Amino acid sequence: MKKNFTFFLAAFLAVSFASAQSLTDAIKLIDVNYKHNAADDIFKKLYSNNPKDPDVIYWYVQSIIDGEGDPTPEEISQAKQVIQKALNDGVNAPILWVASGHLEILEGGDINSAKQKFEQAITATKTKKGENPDILNAIGKANADGGSKIGDPNYGIEKLKRAGELNKTNADIFLNMGLCYRKLGSDYGGEAVKAFQEAIYRDPKNAKAMFQIGRIYQSQNNKDALEENFNNALKADPTFAPAYLALFNYYADKDVNVAKGYLDDFLKYADKDPKNDFFYAEYLFRAGKYSESLAKAKEIEAASGIKAVPRLNILYAYDYDRLNDSVQAKTYIDKFFGNAPASIIQPSDYDLAIKVSSRIPNSEAQTVKYIDLAIQNDTIKANKINYMNEAASLMEKSKNYAEQLKWLQKAVALKGVSGELDYYKLATASFNAKDYMQTMSISKDYINAFPDKTQGYSYFKRAALAADPDTSKGIALDALDVLDSIYSKDKVKNKKEIFKNLFFRLNYYVYQSKELEKGVTVTDKMLELYPEPGEENKYAQDTKATLIAGLSKPKSPGKPGGRPSHNSGSPK
């Protein structure tokens, strides 16, 4: 698949072609998504008639790699062969160095190697008046094309700003600049809109720039703004197919009848290509006609093949999911994600993959992979957080608490702790994962943030005791000190909890560290808590007597006093 691109008209006007009208038609057709077939035919003829003209070669290469989506490996390979043939034929022009660097970026090559080609082209075309703005624009476009991980948009913006200063009329410079800003993420949406608006200022009929502004507002789900800008693009050019398709996609799950009208207009103005019939098959799905959608998809596959229309696999998955065939749906989901370029994957595709995969027994690992892909490719922070929480919930259901904790921590790291529920989930997951030291650390933060809530104290103590169940390590003593410092603020209310902590210490000093003197001190503290006759008082008195007797003998003491009953507040 390809991605929309712009043309430098001045460069073309400097070249003599057999048919100026053919060139104009090619520019108009290929510059708009879904109108490539006729334009490609024209460019093939232009290239055939002018195989050694650098400008023709450059734009023929662009016609190969540009369109809707990122270029396929086959398209990149074809474009590279065109450039190599030119070099073999002795055509070695700066604009072709830019084209070569462009291809290097698109196939994920060394960005520094591509930049070296760009800088050489700038140097070679520099005159007394300064740098060549068309070369700078071509470099900016090379970094604007492709997904967010392709190229260096900041580098592209730098070149485009200089181009915009040198050429005061070319709208395409700012169209490419807006695309570069958009690649930097949602935080740069405002800068992207400003660049597209400058393109419209330079060319009031620039449907492409209006459409791109609409896409930004669509990503923000701003209905009024997206409709205004998509409709502005259609007023500027009623044949601009991408705007009709965007409005179809927007209304497809809101009002299928309105969507159908936009789809009809799209098919009217787009290439007469079986691949575009895919959108009709998608409409049938949206209209709830799942069996008819499947039949149409199979018809398209027979005519064009999955490779030519890779979204057919995910459409099959959508249809089979609605027909309650999760096994078939998952089969096509796996095929789609295994072969489709990232540029054609939509956010809802990840949601479908996650939903269907989570239904299949023992597919947790695969489901999490889809969640991870969704997080990597979603630019909205709130969506990323929701995916992370979804992964955590999935891991909890499968009782993989260690992984649940990791996902919860990722979500909190991204959004920050927003309330007690976050601490509770983290503490619960870490305790269930038997990561008791982590539980204690989380619980300390929990207690500090919400001192009036009991769960923080509960998890802190449970983790401390679980980390040292037989008192052999003594590591729970420090934790109990922390709790007692808090409990001591209201000894009357918390004396049973304090007594339990003292009981733990007593067992440690008697059976582990053999520090009977410290044991006697503990019993004294028990008696301070329960000075009146009662079960706790009796336990402390008896144990103290046993320990004192033991201190007077050379042998180890017997068991101190026996445990108090459950009602006395001793640990369970």
Image (spheres, rainbow, N blue to C red):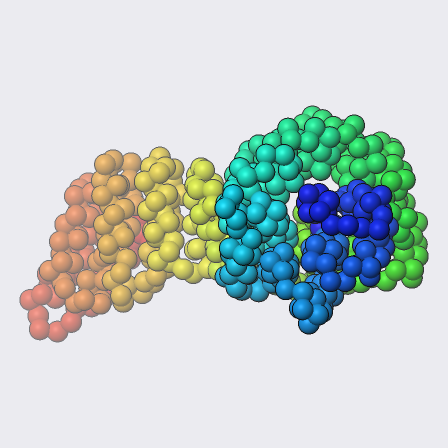
Which residue is outermost to the left?
552
Which residue lies at the image location 20% right of the left edge and 52% below the top edge? 540
Q: Nearer the viewer, residue 521 or 17?
A: 17
Which residue is outermost to the bottom?
555
> Is residue 383 shown left or right of residue 442?
right
Q: Can the viewer see residue 182? A: no
Which residue is outermost to the front?
128
Q: Can the viewer see residue 10? A: yes
Q: Quadrant of residue 335?
A: bottom right
Which quadrant of the rendered structure holds the C terminus?
bottom left
Q: Nearer the viewer, residue 270 or 370?
A: 270
Which residue lies at the image location 23% right of the left edge and 50% below the top edge? 481
Which residue lies at the image location 18% right of the left edge and 56% below the top edge? 542
> Is residue 258 shown left or right of residue 156?
right
Which quadrant of the rendered structure holds the N terminus?
bottom right
What is the total number of numbered labels drawn onto the structure image?
0
Q: Is residue 356 above or below residue 170?
A: below
Q: Is residue 524 above or below residue 257?
A: below
- The image shows residue 214 at horizontal and vertical percentages of 68, 34
Q: Nearer the viewer, residue 317 or 394?
A: 317
- The image shows residue 192 at horizontal and vertical percentages of 58, 37
Q: Is residue 50 above or below residue 68?
A: below
Q: Quadrant of residue 298?
A: bottom right
Which residue lies at the image location 19% right of the left edge and 62% below the top edge? 509
- The image shows residue 237 at horizontal and vertical percentages of 80, 32
> Is residue 355 shown left or right of residue 185?
right
- The image shows residue 18 at horizontal and vertical percentages of 84, 51
Q: Nearer the viewer, residue 359 or 17?
A: 17
